[in-house]
């Protein structure tokens, strides 16, 4: 995509704050052999950037092709605070992070499983022309207890820079929570019943003793 930008001469936090108040985001373009170029990007233009990654052509002199290397956000407003661009050269491989996009509905979810995506992006090495917008994975056949690893994903001309055994997505087996039976209440009820029977038995024996005493007295 093509991104409109203006070259700025004023640098420093004092001017950066002034630009931000005007709806402009300070940015920096750097590369190999070229001097750094200070830029300003309109906030509205940044809405066109759906993600951090992919190639961008800056609408300035020379129309350099770049990639976003770092984005800083304001902690209070979550707005973009500053952007670093890297100048790309023909034939030069770059390291970029590419998002992983899941497609389809896992059959395991229909069977009661819980879908969990562990890896949402990976870092790869590739030529600028081969940078994809994202790696897409069809998870339709993923059943309960099944897992897809990085080695299962087609990365095309990109070389993953991460462990191929890393888990991308899995369908977890749902945990079954059994209802606790009211055993305690039943035990208490049984104990009370036994105590009642013992009490009645003692009372009966006491009455028998009293009757025997009365018989002795009469005789």
Image (cartoon, rainbow, N blue to C red):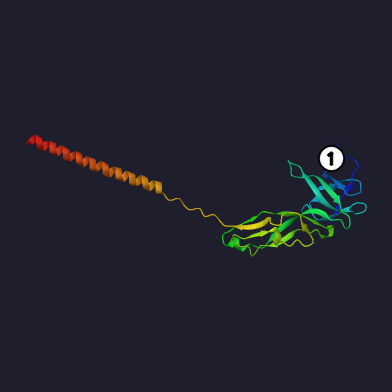
**Label 1, on which residue?**
16
Quarter assignment of residue 88: bottom right
Q: Position of residue 92 (x, y in %)?
A: 86, 56
Observer-nearest of 166 and 219: 166
Residue at image coords 28%, 43%: 196
User: Up-down: is 195 above or below 155?
Assistant: above
Q: Secondary structure at mark 1?
A: helix
- Describe residue 64's horizontal placement relative to residue 110 as left or right: right
Number of labels in the image equals 1
Observer-nearest of 31 and 77: 31
The quarter of the rendered structure image containing the C terminus is: top left
Q: Position of residue 208 (x, y in %)?
A: 17, 40
- Return the residue found at the far top: 217
Residue 49 visible, this angle: no
Observer-nearest of 216 and 26: 216
Q: Position of residue 217 (x, y in %)?
A: 9, 34
The quarter of the rendered structure image containing the N terminus is: bottom right
Residue at image coords 10%, 38%: 215
User: Up-down: is 71 above or below 213?
Assistant: below
Quarter assignment of residue 147: bottom right
- Return the residue found at the far bottom: 141
Observer-nearest of 111 and 61: 111
Q: Position of residue 75 (x, y in %)?
A: 74, 41
């Amino acid at each position: 995509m093509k991104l409109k930008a203006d070259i700025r001469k004023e640098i420093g936090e004092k001017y950066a704050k002034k630009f931000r108040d005007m709806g402009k985001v300070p940015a920096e373009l750097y590369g190999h052999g070229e001097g750094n170029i200070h830029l300003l990007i309109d906030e509205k233009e940044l809405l066109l950037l759906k993600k951090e990654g992919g190639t961008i052509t800056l609408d300035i002199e020379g129309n350099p092709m770049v990639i976003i290397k770092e984005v800083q956000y304001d902690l209070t407003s979550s707005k973009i605070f500053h952007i670093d661009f890297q100048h790309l050269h023909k034939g030069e491989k770059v390291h970029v992070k590419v998002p992983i996009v899941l497609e389809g509905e896992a059959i395991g979810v229909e069977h009661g499983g819980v879908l969990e995506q562990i890896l949402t992006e990976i870092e790869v090495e590739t030529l600028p022309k081969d940078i994809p917008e994202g790696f897409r994975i069809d998870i339709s056949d993923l059943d309960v207890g099944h897992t897809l690893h990085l080695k299962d994903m087609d990365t095309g001309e990109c070389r993953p820079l991460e462990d191929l055994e890393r888990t991308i997505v899995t369908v977890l087996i749902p945990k079954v929570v059994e209802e606790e039976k009211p055993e305690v209440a039943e035990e208490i009820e049984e104990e009370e019943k036994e105590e009642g029977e013992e009490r009645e038995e003692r009372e009966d024996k006491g009455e028998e003793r009293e009757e025997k005493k009365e018989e002795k007295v009469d005789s």
